[in-house]
Amino acid sequence: MLRVGLTGGLGSGKSTVAGYLREFGAEVIEADALGRTLMEPGQQVYSEIVRAFGPGVVGSDGRLNRARLAELAFQGGRIDELNAIVHPAVIAAQRKWMDAVFERNPAAVAVVESALIFEVERDARARGEKEGVLADWRRRIDQVIVVTAPDELKIVRYVARICPEGPGRQAVEADARVRLAHQIPDAEKVARANYVIDNKGTIRELRPQVETLWQHLKTKSNNSLRYESLE
């Protein structure tokens, strides 16, 4: 079995890499999707967010107004406050998912796709947390994959995905720059990664890199299973 963290800044292409890994046979879960589920009405995370940020973040349908919440978090300098509510619950859900995967298949490669693996640890330590589910999250992952791309290319991709039409593109680009500023630069992530996927090129150039990576991950998973059986 192998616990893998797949990370990269916004627009880096990590979701595309995750899709390839799933196609090749990996078990993949997306941190963003988990977060959205935990932020639905009736969930504890939802209640804590409303208590912290006020009823103004609740839309007419009773769900969180994610655009308003993002504005308060990123533009209002409260992103750490939001992350401190959401991240512990997301990580707990990821661990529960991994346990279920490995119970089903001890030789599985379980991949958590998350933009903020390193940032979660950094922010927790900045708050003075030396131990705990956030501060030592990186150590709970066996291998880390970082997907890289030039920042300007990331922004172009992000804007094209969020706002394919002309109106509003400037605001989306400004939002992308704010989000990138909060993320750790690629160079620092690469220094702590086990594998690096360079995604400054085309999809055609990306897939072979991921296919080669998958072979390495499968080998490590099989070796881990073999070592465990010898103990």
Image (tube, rainbow, N blue to C red):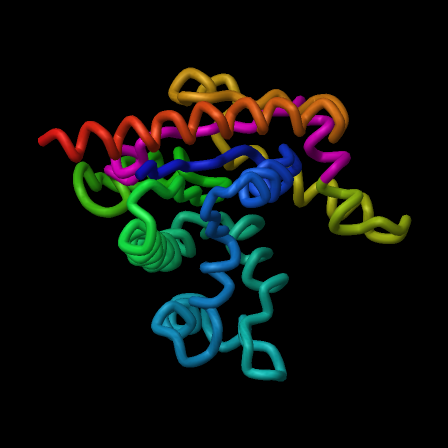
Q: Measured from the top left, where is residue 93 in percent x and y?
A: 34, 58
Quadrant of the rendered image containing residue 142: top left
In this view, 13 is above or below 59: above
Residue drawn 74% across and 37% down? 157
Q: Name the quadrant of the C terminus.
A: top left
Quadrant of the rendered image containing residue 63: bottom right
Which portion, as a residue range, is magenta?
136-157
Residue situated in front as seen by the camera: 121 or 26 = 26
Residue drawn 54% across and 45% down? 22
Q: Is residue 150 magenta?
A: yes
Q: Measured from the top left, where is residue 121 in percent x and y?
A: 32, 37
Q: Is residue 94 left or right of residue 188?
A: left
Quadrant of the rendered image containing residue 124: top left
Q: Measured from the top left, where is residue 107 in percent x and y?
A: 33, 41
Q: Is residue 57 magenta?
A: no
In this view, 20 is above or below 70: above
Q: How many numbered markers are drawn?
A: 0
From where the camera sits, is residue 31 visible?
Answer: yes
Q: Is residue 182 left or right of residue 142?
A: right
Q: Name the quadrant of the N terminus.
A: top left
Q: Residue furthest bottom?
A: 61
Q: Measured from the top left, where is residue 221 in percent x and y?
A: 34, 32
From where the camera sits, is residue 179 visible?
Answer: no
Residue situated in front as seen by the camera: 90 or 97 = 97
Q: Residue furthest right?
A: 166
